[in-house]
Amino acid sequence: MTKGELAKQIFTSGRNCAQSVALAFKDEMELTEEQVLKLSIGFGGGLGRQRLVCGAVSGMVMVLGYLKSNGTDTLSSYSLVQQACAEVKKEIGSLICAELLEGVKTSTGLIPEARTEEYYKKRPCADICQIVADITDKYLKN
């Protein structure tokens, strides 16, 4: 199973987009599931359902920062993030949740919609998690 397939599976099991991408790499980060869930929960829905930066992208940035940076070299980290984000944008069209969900009727407010079969049919999020996690994996291997 690829990291992308794993992230998609995690998303369709009920986790948010940021959690799904980050959890796909929990073993590499040597973090527990609980730690990853806590670190990434607020990034779902484009930063707390504000529909800003796609949560899957935020999950990617967390993973790349954790595994590819030394925590102080901003130049290298920013370069890596910009390259990975450019590839994501090329693949899915945007880094912004609201733009990715354009044309999809969604609810507003703090309460996420119920995860039903219809929910998964109308949103590109599961596929986006798969694409972003595969791109993350590619950048970890380079």
Image (cartoon, rainbow, N blue to C red):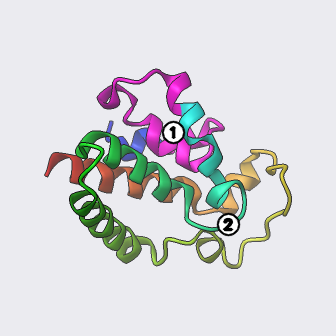
Q: Report how far apart the C-alphas of labels 1 and 2 lie in the structure.
A: 22 Å
Q: Position of residue 12 (x, y in %)?
A: 60, 42
Is residue 52 found left or right of 103 in the rendered image? Answer: left
Q: Position of residue 122 (x, y in %)?
A: 69, 63
Q: Are marks 1 and 2 in contact (CB under 8 Å)?
A: no
**Picture residue at 84% right of the left edge, 63% below the top:** 108
Quarter-wise, where is residue 84 in the image? Answer: bottom left
For numbered disc 2, what is the local secondary structure?
A: loop
Mark 2 crowd level (few <14, some 14–19, many ≥20, 10 Å Cα):
some
Closest to the observer: 95 or 134? 95
Is residue 106 found left or right of 138 in the rendered image? Answer: right
Q: How many marks?
A: 2
What amino acid is at disc 1? Gln
Residue, disc 2: 51
Q: Which of the two discs, 1 and 2, sits closer to the camera?
A: 2
Vertical placement of 112 versus 78: above or below? above
Is residue 139 found left or right of 20 in the rendered image? Answer: left
For numbered disc 1, what is the local secondary structure?
A: helix
Closest to the observer: 53 or 107? 53
What secondary structure do most residues of the magenta stretch adopt? helix
Q: Which mark is residue 9?
A: 1
Q: Position of residue 32 (x, y in %)?
A: 46, 21
**Picture residue at 86% right of the left edge, 59% below the top:** 109
Q: Which residues are magenta?
A: 8-36
